Image (tube, rainbow, N blue to C red):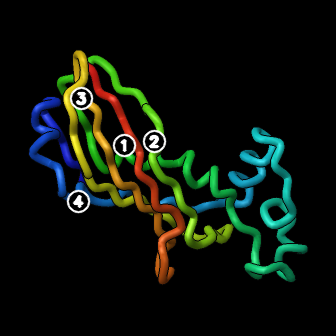
Amino acid sequence: MTTVVKDLDELKGLVGRHLGYSDWLTITQERVDAFADATDDHQWIHVDPERAKAGPFGVAIAHGYLTLSLIPSLLQSVVTIEGMTFGVNYGANKIRFPAPVPVGTEIRLGVSVTSVEDIADGVAVLMEMIIEVRDAPKPSLVAEIVYRYYR
């Protein structure tokens, strides 16, 4: 279920709250290969499933930055922010990849609001983003992402 935030001031009341989870998304070899082509990162652990079977993870894995790049699309099914003219990704304070994302598995995003600060014509929102693989013991990505939303 998507959390709907009616205006930027309402974000302040969400500090410390978990907003929910995205839908599950299957990570396909085709997506990994397309990301490899877009970034020129063709390391065999990502793009050679046969060789990857004998590698450290026993299977091809998604690039960490592919996992990170999926946050904006996954975030759309977690929260909708109304009452703004636009929002921008302002950066990240911390990004960690504690566990791999094996090709063929499903991931989802969990989102919590860490802080909200007033800025000129809007707010800066720090969100904790956690991407997990279905049934995995550890998250695959933990990040502190800063968004700026403007009135």
Q: Are marks 3 and 4 in contact (CB under 8 Å)?
A: no
CA gap, disc 3 and disc 2: 18 Å
Residue under label 3: 123
Label 1: how many residues lie within 10 Å, few (<14), some (14-19) or many (20+)? Answer: some
Q: Secondary structure at mark 2?
A: helix
Q: Earlier in the sequence, mark 3 or mark 2?
A: 2
Residue under label 2: 72
Residue beneath the point at 76% across and 69% down = 60
- Between circles 1 and 4, the one closer to the viewer is 4
Give above or below for 117 relative to 86. below
Residue under label 4: 18
Label 2: how many residues lie within 10 Å, few (<14), some (14-19) or many (20+)? Answer: few
Q: Are marks 2 and 1 in contact (CB under 8 Å)?
A: yes
Residue 117's spot in the image, x, y percent? 21, 34
Residue 36's spot in the image, x, y percent? 78, 48
Label at residue 76: 1
CA gap, disc 4 and disc 2: 17 Å
Quadrant of the image containing the C terminus: top left
Residue beneath the point at 50% across and 80% down = 136
Q: Secondary structure at mark 3?
A: strand
